[in-house]
């Protein structure tokens, strides 16, 4: 049963929509379960169909807890738990994966691409693969852990979610990302010096890095900025 | 004027791969296989233009790192955008005027534009799910029909795939030739595009790397910065 829930949890964002967000994915993950338990099935289907949104990798907590709590006839508590779990699941997942792990894996992959451009293709490719595998090891671990702990703890699953928030992996990933980002900047800077870029070009690169660091986080800002750079780069240099 | 309109089979295959890429990025699994740092060098390698793929992958990976799929947002999609942007410039390699520098220049510009277009496509997919599928699922749930839910789920998934296929097909078929024309027009001028990729990389570093480190660089970033620069310069000194 755990394996089936795990496999089906990969589809939890398949039909994301603006009314119920990822609820159809949750419903589909639990569907075989409800088919095997005809007693009170309509209510179970209805509860699984209720609004739900979280980070996609952490939805397993609610899938596992739903399977357990419906078995224990705790449907009413489950509804309250789902509502309460939305903010922490979103916050923990966004912070760990979108803010730290994905950028960390992205920067490591970029190291690989830089090595590839420098002619070390095999080494570069290996680094890209290692970064991807490392990211997905965490991804798969958290999915499996969510379903396991959800099924094990049922209504008490919120304790594990809170423990995850304090898990040292958050801190270490953030540090690793900050360090690798700094290294990337430093090597890039030294490489620009080695390239023998003249003063104005080097100053241009520094200025652009600093300005883009403070670029407003609006959708239009980045493409407009890049277009301006394209015009300036071709016209002035 | 681009390769795709003359080769419908290739166009269909490229669109098929784009639809699979969309599903992997947004709907199923989300293993991050479609990231620019992975897909673009791979496509470049297959097309025999690895350097183009490496440069585009490097810049786009960092440039759109800050665009996060938080909550209900549909941010620009560098996976789909980068892939389509690379595909429209690859066929211009046969054009003697469109050298590697111009292909990187235009590839990056098109990829950024297409990433925003792909973000809109993702939003349209979600709207379609809301308007077209929500009510059907609701009826199946209220009618206690799990088999119907299963059937609807598979139908909706095929629908998402076809919509992504259509989107990629239209972009490649309609905008591909236009992009190729823009590239050859620009390449015929006296302008020099070689500095642009460095500026994009600098922008990518500025916008992408502040993620997780906040608006100001943290102490570890500064330590890494100094260590990285010192290491490379020391290695250079040793080699000399």
Image (spheres, helix red, strand yellow):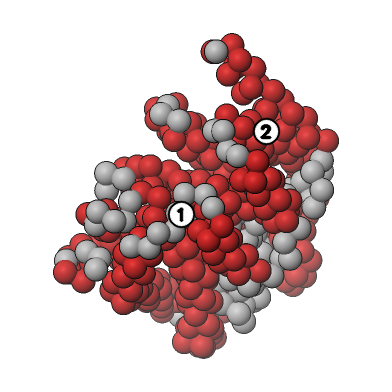
Q: Position of residue A135 (x, y in %)?
A: 57, 41
Q: Foreground residue, A50 or A189?
A: A189
Q: Foreground residue, B227 or B77?
A: B227
In the rendered view, would you say B36 is above or below B220?
below
Please indicate, yes or no, whether residue A129 appears anywhere in the rendered image: no
What residue do we see at 52% from left, 70% from top? B116
Q: Foreground residue, A181 or A134?
A: A181
Which quadrant: the N terminus of chain B? Answer: bottom left
Location of residue A226 by image quarter: bottom right
Q: Position of residue B84 (x, y in %)?
A: 38, 63
Q: Position of residue A237 (x, y in %)?
A: 54, 53
| Badge 1: residue crowd in 10 Å (few <14, some 14–19, many ≥20) | many
B96 horizontally vs A106: left or right:
left
B226 horizontally vs B149: left or right:
right
Which quadrant: the C terminus of chain B? Answer: top right
Q: Which residue is mark 1?
A: B193
In the rendered view, would you say B37 is above or below B21?
above
| Badge 2: residue crowd in 10 Å (few <14, some 14–19, many ≥20) | many
B140 horizontally vs B89: left or right:
right
What residue do we see at 71% from left, 65% from top? A217
């Amino acid at each position: 049963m755990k394996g089936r829930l795990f496999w089906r949890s990969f589809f939890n964002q398949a039909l994301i929509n603006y009314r119920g967000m990822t609820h159809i994915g949750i419903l589909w993950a639990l569907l075989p379960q409800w088919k095997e338990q005809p007693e009170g099935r309509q209510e179970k289907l209805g509860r699984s169909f209720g609004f739900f949104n979280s980070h996609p990798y952490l939805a397993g907590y609610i899938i596992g807890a739903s399977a357990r709590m419906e078995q224990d006839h705790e449907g009413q508590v489950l509804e309250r738990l789902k509502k309460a779990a939305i903010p922490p699941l979103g916050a923990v997942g966004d912070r760990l994966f979108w803010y730290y792990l994905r950028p960390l894996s992205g920067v490591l992959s970029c190291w690989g691409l830089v090595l590839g451009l420098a002619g070390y293709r095999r080494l570069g490719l290996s680094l890209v693969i290692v970064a991807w595998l490392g990211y997905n090891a965490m991804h798969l671990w958290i999915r499996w852990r969510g379903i396991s702990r959800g099924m094990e703890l049922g209504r008490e699953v919120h304790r594990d979610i809170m423990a995850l928030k304090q898990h040292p992996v958050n801190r270490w990933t953030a540090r690793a990302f900050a360090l690798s980002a700094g290294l990337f900047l430093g090597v890039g800077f030294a490489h620009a010096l080695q390239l023998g870029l003249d003063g104005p070009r080097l100053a241009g690169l520094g200025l652009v890095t600093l300005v883009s660091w403070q670029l407003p986080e609006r959708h239009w800002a980045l493409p407009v900025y890049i277009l301006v750079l394209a015009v300036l780069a071709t016209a002035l240099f | 004027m681009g390769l795709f309109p003359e080769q419908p089979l290739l166009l269909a295959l490229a669109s098929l791969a784009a639809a699979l890429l969309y599903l992997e990025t947004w709907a199923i699994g989300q293993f991050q296989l479609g990231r620019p740092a992975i897909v673009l060098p791979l496509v470049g390698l297959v097309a025999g233009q690895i350097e183009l793929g490496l440069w585009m992958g490097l810049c786009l990976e960092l440039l759109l790192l800050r665009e996060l799929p938080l909550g209900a947002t549909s941010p620009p999609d560098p996976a789909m955008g980068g892939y389509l942007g690379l595909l429209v410039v690859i066929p211009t390699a046969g054009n003697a005027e469109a050298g590697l520098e111009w292909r990187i220049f235009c590839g990056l510009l098109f990829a950024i534009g297409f990433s925003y277009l792909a973000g809109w496509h993702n939003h349209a997919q979600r709207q379609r799910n809301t308007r077209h599928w929500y009510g059907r699922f609701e009826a199946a749930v209220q009618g206690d029909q799990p088999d119907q839910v299963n059937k609807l789920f598979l139908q909706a998934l095929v629908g998402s795939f076809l919509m992504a296929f259509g989107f990629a097909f239209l972009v490649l078929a309609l905008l591909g030739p236009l992009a190729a024309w823009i590239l050859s027009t620009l390449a015929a001028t006296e302008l020099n595009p070689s500095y642009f990729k460095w500026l994009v990389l600098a922008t990518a570093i500025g916008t992408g790397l502040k993620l997780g480190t906040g608006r100001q660089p943290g102490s570890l970033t500064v330590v890494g910065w100094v260590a990285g620069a010192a290491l490379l310069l020391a290695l250079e000194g040793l080699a000399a």
